[in-house]
Image (spheres, helix red, strand yellow):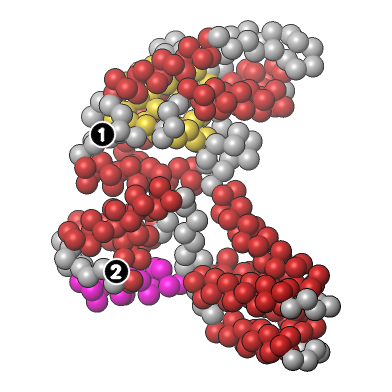
Amino acid sequence: MNYSEDKDKAGEYLRLALGYLVKYKQPASPVNYTVWYEYVSGKNPKLKKTIDSAIESATPLTCNNMEILYQKFVADGDRIVISKLLTKINLMLREITSHVLETEGDLSGHGTILRGLSEEILEVRDFEGAKRIIDQMVLETKALIKSGSNLQSRMKISSSELQQLHRELEKSQQEAHTDSLTGLINRRGLEKRFELERIRAKQNNIPFSIIMLDIDHFKKVNDTYGHLVGDSLLRGISNILKKQLRRNDIAARYGGEEFLILLPESDLAGAGAVAGKIQKGLSTKEWKLKESGESMGSITVSMGISIYAMNESGEAMIKRADDALYVAKTSGRNQVVTQDH
């Protein structure tokens, strides 16, 4: 399990999870809450698929069933991340402890605690257990720093390494969901955001829309100017999308020269307005080669729009937008086509 989302998103997940607890008359136990939190956040596709199947088949979601789901899909999650985390922590503990145990008095006492932690960590099997060990290590190293001992500089380094470990884990999670070329989220990151909007739409009866966007004649750009220029064009389009979208809108690189834009709480008219802003932003952009200053001419995009049909799958909604995009491409390009239900 890795719950690194910001406060607002975590609050939204909390609200949705509690809604399911009430709906299925389940007590707000840690196990029940965790299962529903993982479900609504989209963090656990296999868990979500199993619960969706149970809901569709009207299978009772009892506390006993929730415990089974927890053990099968949650407790065994993130094993690789946890293993790497525990390995790093254990190495740090051994290094620190080997120095501290050579001293006497209070420092030796701290060393004993650290040595105990190095034994405890062998039994840790989840992220929360690892976090508890890290927190205790930070407390002990801070206490050693305050002691004014000869190990002060070593403890500062170790404490810094622990903080760096936290940052590395958060960064690796973010990078896994980000397209390295454009800085937009990738398809993997989009899946979780998309699923959250589907859940919100079902619970609150609030529509949302998507735009599938494809750069016109992108292959010609690559063939004429090379792939480096093509990459630069992709970054330029991405920057325009970032400028034209609202704060809660999400732009993702869907693949190649294709982008998907997720528009929460937006109907077809709203999506059409966003598409118009994107076209306007492109029309005012002067595209030139960086080295020579040679003009590349106008760059246009084709777009297909669809609005969520209640209870349809994400794949079905995306296909409708993709079908609309196909019509735009085959009808002359540089067009916006809307496909309703």
Name the residue at the right extreme.
150
Using the numbered discs, state the Cα–Cα distance from disc 2 to disc 1 in whole angstroms.
28 Å
| Magenta span includes 66 | yes
Name the residue at the bottom extreme.
104
The residue where tag 2 is placed is 32
Identify the residue shown where x is 42% and y is 28%: 246
Quadrant of residue 124 in the image? bottom right
Identify the residue shown where x is 28% and y is 26%: 267
Locate residue 132, reporting x and y percent: 53, 74
First in residue order: circle 2 vs circle 1: 2
Report if residue 333 is visible in the image: no
Segment colored magenta: 62-76
* Horizontal relation, residue 269 to residue 146: left or right: left
The residue where tag 1 is placed is 207
Amino acid type shown at disc 1? Pro
Q: Secondary structure at mark 2?
A: helix
Q: Which sits in the foreground, 157 or 30?
A: 157
Locate residue 146, reporting x and y percent: 71, 74
* Horizontal relation, residue 185 to residue 229: left or right: left
Q: How many marks?
A: 2
Tell me the quadrant of the picture where the C terminus can be found.
top left
Against 238, is 176 above or below?
Answer: below
Identify the residue shown where x is 37% and y is 75%: 71
| Magenta span includes 200 | no
